[in-house]
Amino acid sequence: MTTEDIGVLLHAEHLETLAIANALEVRIMGAEKNRPLGPTASADRTFLGQLVAAIDGAICRHYRFEEETLFPLLQTAGLQDVTAMLTGEHETILTMADELRALAKSAAGAPLDGRQWTRFRETAMDFIHAVMFHIQKEEMGVVRSLSLMLGTAASAELAARYRALQQGCDAAP
């Protein structure tokens, strides 16, 4: 049996988040940027579902795990300033994510009107930039060195707890 590393799991989830951010950017800046999202196009329905799932899953779950489980350990290791900065960024990103989720759910029922589409696109661009910069900081400053900071056993235990959350278990982080 192989043991997982929490850094590897968080990195993989970062890649998934970057993929949805890229798809979001293509949709709001690409060939169909002038066509508001709505339920009539199959591609839109699929994308809206993926976006809401990413916000609810990878982003919200990820941030909650970091703030409730991982960051206290990092603070003990002397990274209080880093975790405070990342937590502040989480708050900002989650505010944008909440707005995107609400607009995406609205678009799943009826095409967004011009005002809603403009707001969606503006919020999406801010969200994309914030998420990309945040992931870059986490990857360079934290994720790569988690197993060294925490130790292999602690990293594996955190990975098991996080894997349970990813698989939809109701256990607290």
Image (cartoon, rainbow, N blue to C red):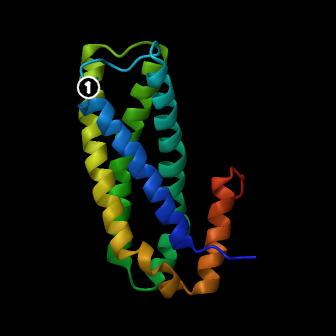
| Quadrant of the drawing holding the N terminus | bottom right
Residue 45 vertical placement versus 66 (above, below): above
Q: Residue at x 38, y 34 (%)?
A: 100
Q: Left of 94 or right of it: where is 151?
A: right
Along the viewing direction, whichever of 110 and 43 lies nearer the viewer: 43
Which kind of residue does numbered mark 1 sit on?
Answer: Ala
Kindly tell me whether residue 16 is visible in this rendering. yes
Residue 128 vertical placement versus 50 (above, below): below
Residue furthest to the right in view is 1
Residue 61 vertical placement versus 121 (above, below): below
Image coordinates for residue 79, horizontal then vertical, percent: 38, 80
From the image, tell me which residue sits under label 1: 31
Image coordinates for residue 2, horizontal then vertical, percent: 70, 76
Kindly tell me whether residue 173 is visible in this rendering. no
Dividing the picture into quadrants, the one containing residue 141 is: bottom left
Dividing the picture into quadrants, the one containing residue 81 is: bottom left
Q: Residue at x 54, y 61 (%)?
A: 65
Image coordinates for residue 19, horizontal then vertical, percent: 41, 47
Along the viewing direction, whichever of 63 and 34 lies nearer the viewer: 34
Along the viewing direction, whichever of 87 and 129 lies nearer the viewer: 129
| Quadrant of the drawing holding the C terminus | bottom right
Q: Residue at x 34, y 73 (%)?
A: 140
Along the viewing direction, whichever of 138 and 11 lies nearer the viewer: 11
Dividing the picture into quadrants, the one containing residue 14 is: bottom left
**Label 1: element kind:** loop
Q: Please tell me how crowded label 1 is: few (under 14), some (14-19), or many (20+) other residues with Cα within 10 Å.
A: few
Image coordinates for residue 41, horizontal then vertical, percent: 44, 16
Residue 159 vertical placement versus 57 (above, below): below
Q: Residue at x 47, y 83 (%)?
A: 76
